[in-house]
Image: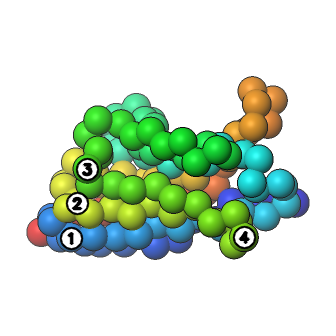
Amino acid sequence: QVQLVESGGGLVQPGGSLRLSCAASGFTFSTYAMTWYRQAPGNERELVARITSGYYRNYTDSVKGRFTISRDNGKKTVYLQMNNLKPEDTAVYYCNAKMNPDVDYWGKGTLVTVSS
């Protein structure tokens, strides 16, 4: 019954903003590292942002200063605030929850399209 449900994707113009949400259920959310990945056509899946159970954050260089990951353990939700969006940010964004190599959950993804 583990479930990760992404929402908030859509079409946005370059320079715009979007906030993605990932609602979790069926596991002890607060003990898991939460990560946003993305995959665009012709590209490999890449890590975008991660926040650990201890609230340590890391980002891929291309989004530093533009994206912010956060989590609300009470709501069992992780967020990705995306500002100053660029066409190269266009991708399907996936939510991942991980505690150890044997425990790894994925959402189905939400599409972000940045285009004029």
Q: What residue is pinned by disc 4? A: 74
Position of residue 1 relative to residue 62, above or below, is below
Q: Are marks 4 and 1 in contact (CB under 8 Å)?
A: no
Taking the image as shown, residue 76 lies to the left or right of residue 22, namely right
- Residue designated by label 3: 65
Q: Secondary structure at mark 4?
A: loop
Q: Amino acid at mark 4?
A: Gly
Q: Quadrant of the N terminus?
A: bottom right
Image coordinates for residue 46, horizontal then vertical, percent: 43, 35
Amino acid type shown at disc 1: Gly
Name the N-terminal-most of marks 1 and 3. 1
Badge 2, how many Cα within 10 Å: few under 14, some, many 20+? many
Report the Cα–Cα distance between label 2 and label 1.
5 Å
| Badge 3 amino acid | Gly
**What kind of residue is marked 2?**
Leu
**Looking at the image, do the residues carrying marks 1 and 3 touch, with CB atoms under 8 Å apart?**
no
Q: Is residue 115 left or right of residue 10?
A: left
Dots 2 and 1: beta carbons under 8 Å?
yes
Residue 97 position within the rendered picture, expressed as x and y whole percent measured from the top left = 68, 46
Number of the front mark, 2 or 3 = 3
Decide which of tag 4 and tag 3 comes sooner along the chain: 3
Q: Secondary structure at mark 3?
A: loop
Q: Residue 85, which numbered label?
A: 2
Label 1 belongs to which residue? Answer: 16
Asked if 51 appears above or below 6 in the picture, the reply is above
